[in-house]
Image (spheres, rainbow, N blue to C red):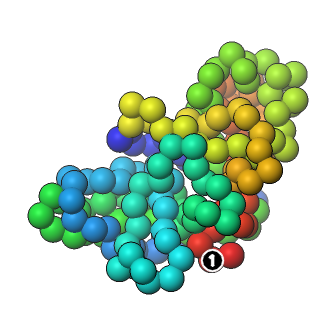
């Protein structure tokens, strides 16, 4: 997976919200990179571990995020590990590249998508933002001056997509 696919939006009043350390199951080498969305099941049915989020997720009420990874996970094929995950805090927004740049490449096109409820796409190990609005999609497109942040989409994570909701 790519590093740094998702970053914190810099023009916000909040400071860095801090990190939590989560367990990651064994089974692959460094399964989560810094800057990737991290999924966590509700309850303790999966051994209280997190994983990288799958494509076309999160779906509100079905998929839950612990946050965005702040480190590379330390898991290996034969040993469980840990990963630092930036806490989900109300009011924090993030930046990510769009899946299809031409859908977002003018201010008018971008502004027409503000408020859309969207998901992450995961193709070739890279997370991007889809442009299709759906009532249960777990991300919301936020306003952004694309001149200051070319090739990026600003989004927030809906409360119903947080494992703390």
The image shows residue 143, relative to residue 106, as above or below, that is below
The image shows residue 28, relative to residue 123, as above or below, that is below
Q: Position of residue 4 (x, y in %)?
A: 45, 43
Q: Residue at x 72, y 67 (%)?
A: 159
Q: Residue at x 71, y 32 (%)?
A: 131
Closer to the camera, 95 or 120? 120
Q: Residue at x 59, y 32 (%)?
A: 97
Q: Residue at x 48, y 38 (%)?
A: 122
Task: Tell me if 101 is positioned left or right of 110 in this view.
Answer: left
Task: Tell me if 65 is positioned left or right of 49 in this view.
Answer: right
The image shows residue 13, relative to residue 122, as above or below, that is below
Image label count: 1
Looking at the image, which residue sits at the far bottom? 44
Task: State the quadrant of the N terminus.
Answer: top left
The image shows residue 105, relative to residue 18, as above or below, that is above
Looking at the image, which residue sits at the far left? 78
Task: Tell me if 61 is positioned left or right of 73 in this view.
Answer: right
Residue 118 in which image quadrant: top right
Q: What residue would you read off at disc 1?
A: 164
Q: Position of residue 157 (x, y in %)?
A: 68, 57
Q: Position of residue 160 (x, y in %)?
A: 71, 66
Secondary structure found at label 1: loop
Task: State the quadrant of the C terminus.
Answer: bottom right
Closer to the camera, 74 or 145? 74
């Amino acid at each position: 997976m790519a590093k740094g696919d998702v970053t914190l939006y810099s023009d916000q009043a909040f400071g860095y919200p801090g990190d939590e350390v989560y367990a990651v199951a064994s089974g692959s080498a460094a399964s989560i990179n810094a800057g990737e969305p991290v999924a966590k099941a509700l309850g303790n049915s999966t051994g209280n571990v997190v994983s990288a989020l799958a494509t076309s997720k999160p779906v509100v009420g079905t998929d839950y995020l612990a946050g965005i990874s702040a480190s590379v996970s330390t898991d290996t094929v034969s040993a469980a590990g840990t990963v630092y995950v930036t806490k989900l805090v109300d009011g924090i927004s993030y930046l990510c590249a769009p899946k299809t740049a031409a859908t977002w490449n003018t201010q008018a096109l971008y502004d027409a998508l503000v408020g859309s409820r969207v998901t992450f796409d995961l193709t070739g190990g890279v997370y991007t933002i889809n442009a299709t609005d759906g009532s249960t999609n777990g991300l919301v497109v936020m306003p952004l001056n694309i001149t200051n942040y070319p090739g990026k989409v600003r989004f927030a994570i809906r409360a119903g997509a947080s494992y703390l909701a």
